[in-house]
Amino acid sequence: MDNLLLQITTMFMGFFAIMNPLANTPVFISLTSDDDEQTTRRIARRAVILAFIIVAVFALAGKLIFSLFGLNMDAFRITGGLLVFLIGFHMLQGQHSHVQHPHSLDRQDEQEDDPVIGIATFPLAMPVLAGPGTLTTAMSLSARGGLTDISLTIATFALLCLITYFVFVSGERFVRYIGHDALGVITRLMGLIVAVMGTGMVIEGARGAFSLG
């Protein structure tokens, strides 16, 4: 029971650190600043649902993807670990990683008539929430074992999506309450955790690839 609780806690903290709903709240606010409360809630709800579906698919089909493309799990852990470390490195500097935020998040670039479809899908669902780092983490966690690990990974991410939704819809009050300085401290702390996770994935992959003890 203790081991299961530790595993769930580790998964949750890993997802929370790399998806970082607290630091992404200002991004959500800026994208929905011209919308009413009802539309804002619809965008937040659709974004977390899409992010959950994307991550669940990668968690479930991780091994199948490896088989289809002839990928090696150890090589994936090393590459994914380097990617996760890079995201954490940028967060430590108080910056958004270009991996998670590939270009300016300007609403004028959106061509969708329905903002719920446009903004919720891109950039919120992907790459802000279900970015490469999140997908790498999900595939790495779910590939460690069997059905139990996959189920725990999906359930843990579902919980985080629920938390993210409530953080987003109360975003303005949240940012106003903790202040931008505190938000920067949280981002840097999460960045340290993400960087350590990435280093651990690289070490784990190298140990398997080179058969280290």
Image (cartoon, rainbow, N blue to C red):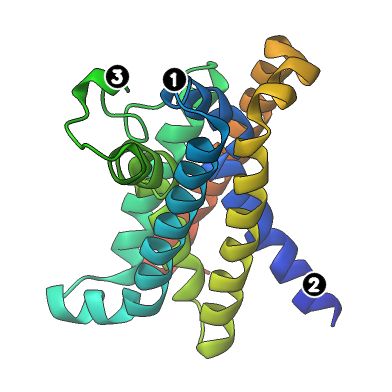
Front position in the image: 193 or 167: 167
Q: How far apart are the two marked residues, 2 and 1, measured between alpha carbons?
A: 42 Å
Which residue is labeled 3 in the image? 106
Q: Contact, CB < 8 Å: mark 3 with mark 1?
A: no
Q: Which of marks 2 and 1 is nearer the N terminus?
A: 2
Is residue 199 at least partly visible in the picture?
Answer: no
Q: In which quarter of the image is the N terminus?
A: bottom right
- Number of callouts: 3
Which residue is labeled 1 in the image? 34
Element assignment for label 3: loop
Front position in the image: 31 or 91: 31
Q: What's under tag 1, amino acid-wise?
A: Asp
Q: What residue is drawn where x is 13% and y is 73%?
A: 69
Tell me residue 12's x, y (percent): 66, 58
Element assignment for label 1: loop
Q: Contact, CB < 8 Å: mark 2 with mark 1?
A: no
Crowdedness of circle 3 by 10 Å Cα count: few (<14), some, many (20+)?
A: few
From what the image shows, is residue 6 above or below residue 137? below
Front position in the image: 143 or 108: 108
Q: What's under tag 3, amino acid-wise?
A: Asp
Which residue is labeled 2 in the image? 5
Tell me residue 13's x, y (percent): 68, 52
Mark on residue 48?
Answer: none
